[in-house]
Image (tube, grey):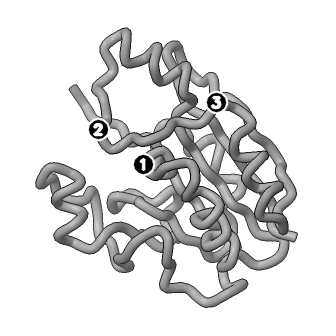
């Protein structure tokens, strides 16, 4: 079986928001667009999280997603695919605030995550479980969190619906 990353599955939906300078948080060395900075866990934590599997490409920036090594208002986009569900929902405002901090006004926050009910259905049909998941969102959860932290205009939050068994939510917000 050939592995296709979650990012690769949805590039046709996300690339239009990835102009200019941006960062792909938890890229696993396969950034959403070639010009995005790949950011992922420190090497030891990365190998532990990925059961010893090497990244798909170089990862020049390392650290933790709740503290980006980037100046305020310096990026045109922040992209994250299938990461927030690894954190308890009560930590999402902190994460979204941090990610929003580095985006220039007019820039985009782009998030992909599995939708809770669709993910459960995929698991029931044989999808490999991910033990790192702590909370898969429902449609509308990211809009609620964006409204709570402020400074973001939601452009879209929808199910991706690209193929049978697709379980992902696409959320895009513009920084004000």
Q: Residue at x 73, y 63 (%)?
A: 108
Q: Earlier in the sequence, mark 1 or mark 3?
A: 1
In the image, which is nearer the foreground, mark 1 or mark 3? Answer: 1
Q: Nearer the viewer, mark 2 or mark 3?
A: 2
Numbered mark located on residue 131 in the image: 2
Whole-angstrom CA distance, mark 1 to mark 2, is 9 Å
Task: For the N terminus, give its image quadrant.
Answer: top left
Q: Quadrant of residue 6?
A: top left
Q: CA distance from mark 1 to mark 3?
A: 20 Å
According to the image, label 3 marks what residue? Answer: 160
Q: Dot 3, crowdedness within 10 Å: few (<14), some or many (≥20)?
A: some
> Badge 2: how crowded within 10 Å, few (<14), some, or many (20+)?
few
What's the residue at 48%, 73% (across, down)? 37
Q: Which residue sits furthest bottom?
A: 71
Indicate the secondary structure of the residue bearing disc 2: loop
Q: Which numbered disc, 1 or 2, marks the residue that appears first in the sequence?
A: 1
């Amino acid at each position: 079986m050939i592995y296709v990353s979650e990012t690769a599955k949805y590039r046709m939906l996300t690339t239009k928001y990835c102009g200019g300078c941006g960062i792909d948080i938890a890229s696993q060395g396969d950034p959403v667009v070639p010009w995005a900075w790949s950011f992922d866990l420190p090497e030891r934590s990365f190998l532990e999280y990925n059961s010893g599997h090497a990244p798909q490409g170089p990862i020049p920036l390392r650290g933790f997603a709740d503290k980006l090594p980037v100046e305020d208002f310096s990026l045109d986009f922040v992209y994250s695919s299938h990461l927030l569900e690894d954190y308890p929902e009560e930590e999402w405002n902190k994460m979204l605030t941090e990610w929003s901090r580095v985006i220039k006004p007019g820039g985009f926050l782009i998030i992909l995550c599995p939708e809770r009910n669709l993910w459960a259905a995929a698991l029931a049909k044989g999808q490999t479980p991910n033990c790192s998941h702590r909370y898969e969102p429902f449609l509308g959860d990211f809009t609620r969190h964006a409204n709570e932290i402020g400074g973001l205009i939601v452009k879209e939050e929808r199910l991706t619906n690209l193929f049978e068994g697709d379980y992902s939510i696409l959320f895009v917000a513009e920084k004000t």
